Image (cartoon, rainbow, N blue to C red):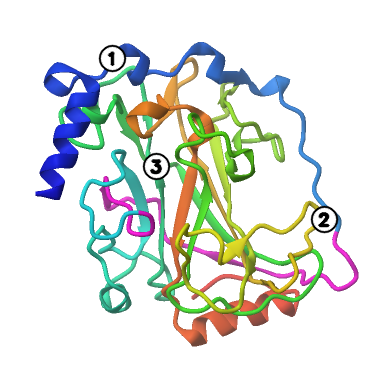
Amino acid sequence: MVLGVCVALAVGILGLGGHPSSAQAAPSADRYVDISAVSATAVPADGPDASRGSFTEDCGRNENGHRNADNLVISPGLTGGAHHVHDYVGNVTTDALSTNEGLAAAATTCVGGDRSTYYWPVLRRLDRTGSDAHAVGGGIDGNAGEILVASSVRMEFRSSPTSEVVAMPRFLRMVTGDPVAATVNEPGRVRAQWGCSGYAERFTVKYTLCPEGSGPTRTLDFPSCWDGLSTDSPDHRSHVVFPAANGVCPRATFAVPQLRITLTYDVPHGVRYALDSFPEQKRDPVTDHGLFVNVMTDRRMEQLVSCINEGRHCRPE
């Protein structure tokens, strides 16, 4: 019943027959910027007590096509509740109805057995029609175009520039970015970082126009200051927050490994592309976001933390 009401509302918002308007199907031209006009972002220097290691996961590029319009973290139990499509790597069973127990028993695409779930909205090329043009999350919700599979997905757990890191608790949930940023004025939640391959540290909140031989990138940096108690909170954010610009965590929080997901896409030169979003967000690039549920075993998390704090650069085997 709830799902039926949600679908009816989505169709009602979009107009007769559920077909998106052109304003919903493609962002305006001012939402794009040439990468040559984007300046490099300053990176804070490590302090004397920094943990200098890293741990890189290999969970593939979603070659198995695990996608849905659910959001386990924000809308648990509500099938189709995201109204846009998410790409998943890691845990192969994640959907709105997943439980901690189910996730812990599932298979994974990650080398070494990490059953965590990592997900983000899909990217689409706008010169082609998607196979979900008449589906919830796709065309019915204004998300037109053919879904692009990332050419590269890099997931790295990074050190703190000011201290050692502590272990994340199992089933910790984290959100980065703001899926309603285009209509809600909370600039502190915006974490969109669009770039182009070959242009390190050049990030912008707009879609990037890349030269031939370079493709658009998305860099999703997650919060890394945990309250030491909770695996979730009512707003899904208060329990794990971002450090200050100098890397220092707020009082009464603890530095945990900082997850960075970097997505790279092969888009033909000159072809426009856009992110999936809620219909009212009109596919604005500022709404880019990502989500994570930690399903690592305690032993795996201990190995990750030790690697980072000992200054090593590790990959699972």
Using residue 35 as the reference point, say whether residue 73 is left or right of it. left
Q: Which residue is mark 3?
A: 121
What residue is at 14 percent from the left and 49 percent from the top? 2
Q: Crowding near pointer 2: few (<14 within 10 Å), some, many (20+)?
A: few
The reply to whether the magenta stretch includes residue 133 is no
Q: Quadrant of residue 144?
A: top left
Mark 1 vs mark 3: which is more N-terminal? 1
What amino acid is at disc 3?
Pro
What kind of element bears circle 2?
loop
The reply to whether the magenta stretch includes residue 60 is yes
The dot on residue 246 is 2
Q: Position of residue 168 (x, y in %)?
A: 56, 76
Q: Which residue is mark 1?
A: 21
What amino acid is at disc 2?
Asn
Specify the segment rendered in magenta.
46-74
Task: Examine the rendering and report whether any part of residue 18 can be seen.
Answer: yes
